Amino acid sequence: MEQKNGSSLTGFILLGFSDRPQLEIVLFVVLLVFYIFTLLGNTAIIALSHLDPHLHTPMYFFLSNLSFLDLCYTTSIVPQLLVNLRGADKSISFGGCVVQMYISLGLGCTECILLGVMAFDRYAAVCRPLHYTVIMHSRLCALMASASWFIGFANSLLQTVLTFLLPLCGRNKLDHFFCEIPALLKLACVDITMIESEIFFVSAMDLLLPVAFIMFSYGRIVRAILRIKSAAGQRKAFGTCVSHLTVVALFYGTAIYAYLQPSNNYSQDQGKFISLFYTIIAPMINPLIYTLRNKDVKGAMKKILWKDYDFR
């Protein structure tokens, strides 16, 4: 009997990169290495932020939140992808697909908001340095971080429900390596114009509102930096923002490409490789971006790993 809707499906076949079988072993090895580095890098940031008293500041509180988020985000996708790349079984259960979408989308939405919160922190540090500790007190930081997680997962619940209410008429071959909205919309067997518009609107709000807030914050930050008379002071103030701006550009650039374009312009192959970037590569390089130019983090690492040595 033909299956009439998604709820009657027992699972999905994640085609992923099965059209390029020669790449699967290479991808398995590369992604396993990336995943290990992601775990090590983000765990190191979290540990350093908690172990070194000098890093008990709002900036590193939010950075440890971002690292924990990246750990969870990658872990919600990569283990299943590695299993599918390694063996002949490319399936994921219907419930597993729902949970994977809800968690990965919730974490992605949370990151959108958290990057905006981190821009506010940089604004307060550069533009209101004398009042920074008063503005960014611990209760406000905890409230903003908690609100980011709550809003992110509430939004994910809405988008996940809207997506899985679509009738799939027994279609279960998902041309992707994980359960993501653009790929699942292609399985629908009805006109999806309305639901597509609703999801596009919600995605636009998730992505463009934080981007607008970040641009506004950095507009004020640039004005404040230009008023600093010494070149050394300008470099120091701008240096505190470079890492965050780099992460913002990488995350939002790829996410906007994936979610904010008409479906008729959406290339599935391009979509898969763009998704690889913001689900696997970006969480791996974020710790490097925040540590390579950061003397505080490098100093904390030296003190913890080689505390018996004198580096003066």
Image (cartoon, rainbow, N blue to C red):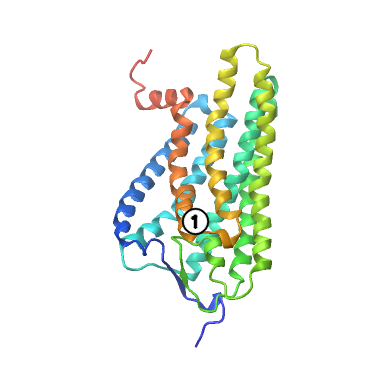
Quadrant in the rendering for residue 125: top right
* Picture residue at 33% right of the left edge, 20% below the top: 308
Quadrant in the rendering for residue 216: top right
- Quadrant position of the C terminus in the picture: top left
Q: Is residue 108 above or below residue 18?
A: above
| Mark count | 1
Q: Is residue 151 above or below residue 232?
A: below
Q: Is residue 50 above or below residue 145?
A: above
Q: Position of residue 47 (x, y in %)?
A: 45, 35
Inspect the image, locate mark 1, and give the three-letter code of the amino acid beneath it.
Gly
Q: Is residue 111 left or right of residue 52?
A: right
Q: Position of residue 87 (x, y in %)?
A: 31, 64
Q: Position of residue 117 (x, y in %)?
A: 64, 38
* Picture residue at 61% right of the left edge, 53% below the top: 260
Residue sticking out furthest to the front = 265
* Picture residue at 54% right of the left edge, 24% below the top: 239
What residue would you read off at disc 1?
A: 271
Q: Is residue 99 left or right of residue 81?
A: right
Q: Is residue 82 visible?
A: yes
Q: Is residue 136 visible?
A: no
Q: Position of residue 62 (x, y in %)?
A: 57, 36
Q: Nearer the viewer, residue 16 or 154?
A: 16
* Picture residue at 53% right of the left edge, 47% below the top: 254
Quadrant in the rendering for residue 229: top right
Is the residue marked by circle 1 packed among few (<14), some (14-19), or many (20+) residues within 10 Å? some
Q: Is residue 233 left or right of residue 179?
A: right
